[in-house]
Amino acid sequence: MQFEHRMGLFSCRASNDFAQKVIEAINQLGGPEEGEKLRLGNLEVTQFSDGEFQPHYEESVRGATVFIIQSTFPPTDNLMELLLSIDAAKRASAHKVIAVIPYFGWARQDRKDKPRVAIGAKLVANLLRAAGADRVMTCDLHADQIQGFFDIPVDHVYASKVFIPTIERLHLDNLAIAAPDMGGAKRANAYAGSLNKKGGCSVIICHKTRERANVVAEIRAIGDVKGKNVILVDDMIDTAGTLCKAAGVLMDQGAVSVRACATHGVLSGNALEKIEASVLKEVFITDTIPHPEIGPGSKIKIVSMAAVFAAIIKKVYNYEPVSTEFIF
Protein backbone atom coordinates (compact mmCIF):
# COMPACT_ATOMS: atom_id res chain seq x y z
CA MET A 1 0.00 0.00 0.00
CA GLN A 2 1.31 3.48 -0.88
CA PHE A 3 0.87 6.38 1.50
CA GLU A 4 0.31 9.94 0.34
CA HIS A 5 3.46 12.01 0.75
CA ARG A 6 2.30 15.00 2.77
CA MET A 7 3.74 17.50 5.20
CA GLY A 8 2.31 18.47 8.57
CA LEU A 9 3.89 21.50 10.22
CA PHE A 10 3.00 22.15 13.85
CA SER A 11 4.25 24.43 16.58
CA CYS A 12 4.41 24.16 20.33
CA ARG A 13 3.31 27.21 22.27
CA ALA A 14 6.68 28.92 22.73
CA SER A 15 7.40 29.20 18.99
CA ASN A 16 4.01 29.96 17.43
CA ASP A 17 5.08 33.33 15.98
CA PHE A 18 8.25 31.87 14.46
CA ALA A 19 6.28 28.96 13.00
CA GLN A 20 3.83 31.34 11.31
CA LYS A 21 6.75 33.15 9.66
CA VAL A 22 8.18 29.79 8.50
CA ILE A 23 4.79 28.90 6.98
CA GLU A 24 4.69 32.21 5.09
CA ALA A 25 8.24 31.68 3.82
CA ILE A 26 7.50 28.11 2.65
CA ASN A 27 4.42 29.34 0.78
CA GLN A 28 6.49 32.08 -0.86
CA LEU A 29 8.82 29.32 -2.07
CA GLY A 30 5.85 27.60 -3.68
CA GLY A 31 4.65 25.42 -0.81
CA PRO A 32 5.93 21.97 0.21
CA GLU A 33 5.24 20.88 -3.36
CA GLU A 34 4.79 23.26 -6.30
CA GLY A 35 1.51 25.16 -6.14
CA GLU A 36 0.53 23.71 -2.75
CA LYS A 37 -0.25 26.07 0.13
CA LEU A 38 0.78 25.04 3.63
CA ARG A 39 -0.99 26.00 6.84
CA LEU A 40 -0.02 25.58 10.47
CA GLY A 41 -1.56 22.41 11.88
CA ASN A 42 -3.77 22.38 14.95
CA LEU A 43 -1.83 21.29 18.02
CA GLU A 44 -3.72 22.10 21.19
CA VAL A 45 -2.42 21.79 24.74
CA THR A 46 -4.67 20.86 27.65
CA GLN A 47 -3.42 22.49 30.86
CA PHE A 48 -4.16 20.87 34.22
CA SER A 49 -4.41 22.83 37.46
CA ASP A 50 -1.27 21.28 38.95
CA GLY A 51 0.90 22.48 36.03
CA GLU A 52 0.80 19.23 34.02
CA PHE A 53 -0.17 19.57 30.36
CA GLN A 54 -1.05 17.32 27.42
CA PRO A 55 -0.50 18.17 23.71
CA HIS A 56 -3.19 16.92 21.34
CA TYR A 57 -3.26 16.88 17.52
CA GLU A 58 -6.70 18.00 16.33
CA GLU A 59 -6.17 16.52 12.85
CA SER A 60 -4.82 13.27 11.47
CA VAL A 61 -1.05 12.93 11.06
CA ARG A 62 -1.18 9.29 9.94
CA GLY A 63 1.47 8.69 7.28
CA ALA A 64 2.59 12.35 7.29
CA THR A 65 6.07 13.81 7.62
CA VAL A 66 5.53 15.93 10.73
CA PHE A 67 7.69 18.94 11.53
CA ILE A 68 7.33 20.27 15.10
CA ILE A 69 8.80 23.72 15.77
CA GLN A 70 9.83 24.57 19.32
CA SER A 71 12.75 26.42 20.88
CA THR A 72 13.79 24.93 24.21
CA PHE A 73 14.67 28.10 26.07
CA PRO A 74 13.61 28.27 29.74
CA PRO A 75 11.30 27.25 31.31
CA THR A 76 11.90 23.52 31.04
CA ASP A 77 8.21 23.11 30.17
CA ASN A 78 9.17 24.04 26.59
CA LEU A 79 11.36 20.95 26.27
CA MET A 80 8.76 18.71 27.91
CA GLU A 81 6.04 20.05 25.59
CA LEU A 82 8.22 19.24 22.57
CA LEU A 83 8.94 15.71 23.83
CA LEU A 84 5.24 15.03 24.47
CA SER A 85 4.34 16.39 21.02
CA ILE A 86 6.89 14.10 19.35
CA ASP A 87 5.56 11.12 21.30
CA ALA A 88 1.95 11.99 20.41
CA ALA A 89 2.80 12.22 16.69
CA LYS A 90 4.58 8.83 16.72
CA ARG A 91 1.67 7.21 18.56
CA ALA A 92 -0.69 8.74 15.96
CA SER A 93 1.23 6.85 13.22
CA ALA A 94 3.15 9.75 11.68
CA HIS A 95 5.56 8.48 9.02
CA LYS A 96 8.43 10.68 10.28
CA VAL A 97 8.73 13.23 13.06
CA ILE A 98 11.28 16.00 12.68
CA ALA A 99 12.02 18.26 15.64
CA VAL A 100 12.77 21.80 14.50
CA ILE A 101 14.56 23.44 17.44
CA PRO A 102 15.68 26.97 16.48
CA TYR A 103 17.33 27.39 19.91
CA PHE A 104 18.68 24.19 21.47
CA GLY A 105 18.71 24.66 25.24
CA TRP A 106 21.28 22.97 27.51
CA ALA A 107 23.87 23.26 24.72
CA ARG A 108 26.36 24.89 27.10
CA GLN A 109 26.46 21.62 29.05
CA ASP A 110 28.43 19.80 26.37
CA ARG A 111 31.20 18.30 28.53
CA LYS A 112 32.27 17.63 32.11
CA ASP A 113 34.08 20.87 32.93
CA LYS A 114 34.22 19.98 36.62
CA PRO A 115 33.64 16.82 38.66
CA ARG A 116 30.17 15.37 39.28
CA VAL A 117 28.17 17.37 36.71
CA ALA A 118 25.74 16.23 34.01
CA ILE A 119 26.31 16.54 30.27
CA GLY A 120 22.95 18.14 29.64
CA ALA A 121 23.26 18.42 25.85
CA LYS A 122 23.78 14.66 25.54
CA LEU A 123 20.84 13.97 27.86
CA VAL A 124 18.52 16.16 25.77
CA ALA A 125 19.72 14.42 22.59
CA ASN A 126 18.86 11.06 24.17
CA LEU A 127 15.43 12.33 25.27
CA LEU A 128 14.57 13.54 21.76
CA ARG A 129 15.54 10.18 20.28
CA ALA A 130 13.65 8.27 22.98
CA ALA A 131 10.53 10.37 22.36
CA GLY A 132 10.61 9.27 18.71
CA ALA A 133 12.28 12.08 16.75
CA ASP A 134 13.64 10.84 13.40
CA ARG A 135 15.62 14.00 12.65
CA VAL A 136 16.57 17.30 14.31
CA MET A 137 17.01 20.76 12.82
CA THR A 138 18.67 23.42 14.92
CA CYS A 139 20.69 26.62 14.67
CA ASP A 140 24.15 27.65 15.90
CA LEU A 141 24.80 25.06 18.58
CA HIS A 142 27.08 26.27 21.36
CA ALA A 143 29.57 23.61 20.24
CA ASP A 144 29.53 21.95 16.80
CA GLN A 145 30.42 18.57 18.26
CA ILE A 146 26.98 18.34 19.93
CA GLN A 147 25.81 16.98 16.56
CA GLY A 148 27.76 13.85 17.47
CA PHE A 149 25.58 13.34 20.56
CA PHE A 150 22.70 12.33 18.27
CA ASP A 151 22.15 8.92 16.69
CA ILE A 152 19.77 10.52 14.18
CA PRO A 153 20.47 13.06 11.39
CA VAL A 154 21.01 16.68 12.48
CA ASP A 155 20.66 19.69 10.19
CA HIS A 156 22.81 22.38 11.79
CA VAL A 157 21.83 25.78 10.37
CA TYR A 158 24.15 28.80 10.73
CA ALA A 159 22.91 32.33 11.41
CA SER A 160 25.79 33.60 9.25
CA LYS A 161 23.31 33.04 6.42
CA VAL A 162 21.45 36.17 7.58
CA PHE A 163 24.13 38.00 9.58
CA ILE A 164 26.74 38.31 6.81
CA PRO A 165 24.31 40.11 4.47
CA THR A 166 23.28 42.30 7.43
CA ILE A 167 26.92 43.25 8.09
CA GLU A 168 27.50 43.96 4.39
CA ARG A 169 24.53 46.33 4.32
CA LEU A 170 26.17 48.44 7.05
CA HIS A 171 28.95 49.44 4.58
CA LEU A 172 31.53 49.87 7.37
CA ASP A 173 35.12 50.91 6.65
CA ASN A 174 38.05 49.32 8.53
CA LEU A 175 35.87 46.40 9.56
CA ALA A 176 37.05 43.90 12.17
CA ILE A 177 35.25 40.81 13.46
CA ALA A 178 35.77 40.03 17.13
CA ALA A 179 35.16 36.92 19.22
CA PRO A 180 34.07 37.75 22.80
CA ASP A 181 36.04 34.73 24.11
CA MET A 182 38.55 32.13 22.91
CA GLY A 183 35.78 29.64 22.20
CA GLY A 184 34.35 31.94 19.53
CA ALA A 185 37.60 32.23 17.56
CA LYS A 186 36.51 29.71 14.92
CA ARG A 187 33.22 31.55 14.35
CA ALA A 188 34.97 34.94 14.09
CA ASN A 189 37.49 33.54 11.57
CA ALA A 190 34.67 32.07 9.47
CA TYR A 191 32.79 35.39 9.39
CA ALA A 192 35.97 37.29 8.50
CA GLY A 193 36.75 34.74 5.79
CA SER A 194 33.35 35.27 4.16
CA LEU A 195 33.58 39.06 4.45
CA ASN A 196 37.17 39.12 3.13
CA LYS A 197 35.83 38.04 -0.25
CA LYS A 198 34.23 41.49 -0.47
CA GLY A 199 37.08 43.49 1.14
CA GLY A 200 39.60 43.53 3.98
CA CYS A 201 38.43 42.33 7.38
CA SER A 202 40.67 41.58 10.36
CA VAL A 203 40.02 39.37 13.40
CA ILE A 204 40.20 40.27 17.08
CA ILE A 205 40.06 37.70 19.88
CA CYS A 206 38.99 38.60 23.41
CA HIS A 207 40.53 36.53 26.20
CA LYS A 208 38.07 36.14 29.05
CA THR A 209 38.42 34.84 32.60
CA ARG A 210 35.41 34.14 34.83
CA GLU A 211 34.98 34.36 38.57
CA ARG A 212 31.99 31.98 38.33
CA ALA A 213 29.14 31.18 35.92
CA ASN A 214 27.70 34.37 34.34
CA VAL A 215 30.29 36.57 36.11
CA VAL A 216 33.24 37.84 34.05
CA ALA A 217 36.44 38.76 35.92
CA GLU A 218 38.59 40.23 33.13
CA ILE A 219 38.66 40.61 29.33
CA ARG A 220 41.69 41.43 27.18
CA ALA A 221 41.52 42.10 23.43
CA ILE A 222 44.14 40.47 21.19
CA GLY A 223 44.57 42.07 17.76
CA ASP A 224 44.54 45.42 15.99
CA VAL A 225 41.65 47.41 17.46
CA LYS A 226 42.58 51.07 16.91
CA GLY A 227 40.53 52.82 14.23
CA LYS A 228 38.35 49.75 13.57
CA ASN A 229 34.59 49.37 13.31
CA VAL A 230 34.26 46.17 15.31
CA ILE A 231 31.49 43.59 15.19
CA LEU A 232 31.40 41.01 17.97
CA VAL A 233 29.95 37.67 16.86
CA ASP A 234 28.64 35.02 19.24
CA ASP A 235 26.12 32.20 19.43
CA MET A 236 24.09 33.71 22.28
CA ILE A 237 23.62 36.60 24.67
CA ASP A 238 22.57 35.46 28.13
CA THR A 239 23.16 38.08 30.83
CA ALA A 240 25.04 40.34 28.35
CA GLY A 241 27.88 40.72 30.87
CA THR A 242 30.58 39.39 28.54
CA LEU A 243 29.25 41.30 25.53
CA CYS A 244 29.02 44.69 27.24
CA LYS A 245 32.38 44.32 28.99
CA ALA A 246 34.10 43.25 25.75
CA ALA A 247 32.57 46.24 23.93
CA GLY A 248 33.89 48.58 26.62
CA VAL A 249 37.40 47.10 26.39
CA LEU A 250 37.40 47.46 22.58
CA MET A 251 36.32 51.09 22.76
CA ASP A 252 38.99 51.79 25.39
CA GLN A 253 41.60 50.36 23.01
CA GLY A 254 40.62 52.75 20.21
CA ALA A 255 37.75 51.15 18.29
CA VAL A 256 35.62 53.65 16.34
CA SER A 257 32.42 51.70 17.02
CA VAL A 258 31.33 48.33 18.37
CA ARG A 259 28.32 46.34 17.26
CA ALA A 260 27.33 42.73 17.90
CA CYS A 261 25.66 39.83 16.10
CA ALA A 262 24.47 36.99 18.33
CA THR A 263 22.18 34.22 17.17
CA HIS A 264 20.17 33.50 20.30
CA GLY A 265 18.97 36.35 22.49
CA VAL A 266 18.43 34.58 25.80
CA LEU A 267 18.59 38.01 27.51
CA SER A 268 18.13 36.83 31.08
CA GLY A 269 18.01 39.08 34.13
CA ASN A 270 18.68 42.74 33.31
CA ALA A 271 20.45 42.00 30.01
CA LEU A 272 18.25 44.41 28.06
CA GLU A 273 19.08 47.29 30.38
CA LYS A 274 22.80 46.46 30.23
CA ILE A 275 22.81 46.57 26.44
CA GLU A 276 20.87 49.84 26.25
CA ALA A 277 23.29 51.47 28.73
CA SER A 278 26.44 50.07 27.07
CA VAL A 279 28.78 51.53 24.44
CA LEU A 280 27.37 49.10 21.86
CA LYS A 281 25.99 50.96 18.86
CA GLU A 282 23.70 48.14 17.66
CA VAL A 283 23.05 44.52 18.58
CA PHE A 284 21.59 42.10 16.02
CA ILE A 285 19.89 38.93 17.25
CA THR A 286 17.64 36.41 15.48
CA ASP A 287 14.07 35.40 16.24
CA THR A 288 14.95 31.87 17.41
CA ILE A 289 13.74 33.06 20.83
CA PRO A 290 10.71 35.42 20.88
CA HIS A 291 11.18 38.92 22.26
CA PRO A 292 7.93 40.90 21.97
CA GLU A 293 9.28 43.38 24.54
CA ILE A 294 11.93 44.75 22.15
CA GLY A 295 10.56 47.91 20.55
CA PRO A 296 11.55 49.96 17.46
CA GLY A 297 13.77 52.39 19.40
CA SER A 298 15.96 49.71 20.98
CA LYS A 299 19.63 49.12 20.17
CA ILE A 300 18.62 45.50 19.64
CA LYS A 301 17.51 44.67 16.10
CA ILE A 302 15.88 41.32 15.25
CA VAL A 303 16.85 39.49 12.05
CA SER A 304 14.58 36.61 11.06
CA MET A 305 15.80 33.05 10.50
CA ALA A 306 12.38 31.94 9.24
CA ALA A 307 13.31 31.95 5.53
CA VAL A 308 16.44 29.87 6.22
CA PHE A 309 14.49 27.24 8.16
CA ALA A 310 11.73 27.27 5.53
CA ALA A 311 14.22 26.45 2.76
CA ILE A 312 15.76 23.60 4.81
CA ILE A 313 12.34 22.18 5.76
CA LYS A 314 11.13 22.18 2.15
CA LYS A 315 14.33 20.53 0.89
CA VAL A 316 14.34 17.85 3.59
CA TYR A 317 10.66 17.09 2.88
CA ASN A 318 11.36 16.74 -0.85
CA TYR A 319 14.58 14.71 -0.32
CA GLU A 320 16.71 17.45 -1.90
CA PRO A 321 20.32 18.26 -0.91
CA VAL A 322 20.62 20.98 1.74
CA SER A 323 24.36 21.78 1.47
CA THR A 324 23.68 24.99 -0.49
CA GLU A 325 21.85 26.42 2.53
CA PHE A 326 25.01 26.59 4.65
CA ILE A 327 27.70 29.29 4.51
CA PHE A 328 30.13 27.59 6.91
Image (tube, rainbow, N blue to C red):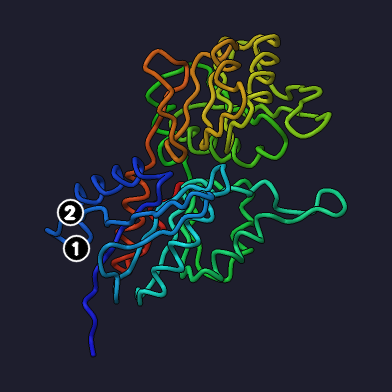
Residue at image point 31% right, 47% down: 22
On residue 30, which mark appears?
2
How crowded pointer 2 is (Cα within 10 Å; few <14, some 14-19, many 20+) is rated as some
What quarter of the picture does the N terminus occupy?
bottom left
Most extreme residue toward the bottom is 1
194 and 297: which is toward the camera: 297
> The disc labelled 2 sits on which kind of residue?
Gly
Q: Are marks 1 and 2 in contact (CB under 8 Å)?
A: yes
Residue at image point 58% right, 71% down: 151
Disc 1 and disc 2: Cα gap in Å? 7 Å
Image spot of residue 77 (x, y percent): 53, 49
> The disc labelled 1 sits on which kind of residue?
Glu
Q: Is residue 60 left or right of residue 120?
A: left
Please give the residue where the numbered disc 1 appears in the rendered image.
33
Residue at image point 44% right, 15% down: 298
The local secondary structure at tag 1 comes to: loop
Image spot of residue 100 (x, y percent): 43, 55
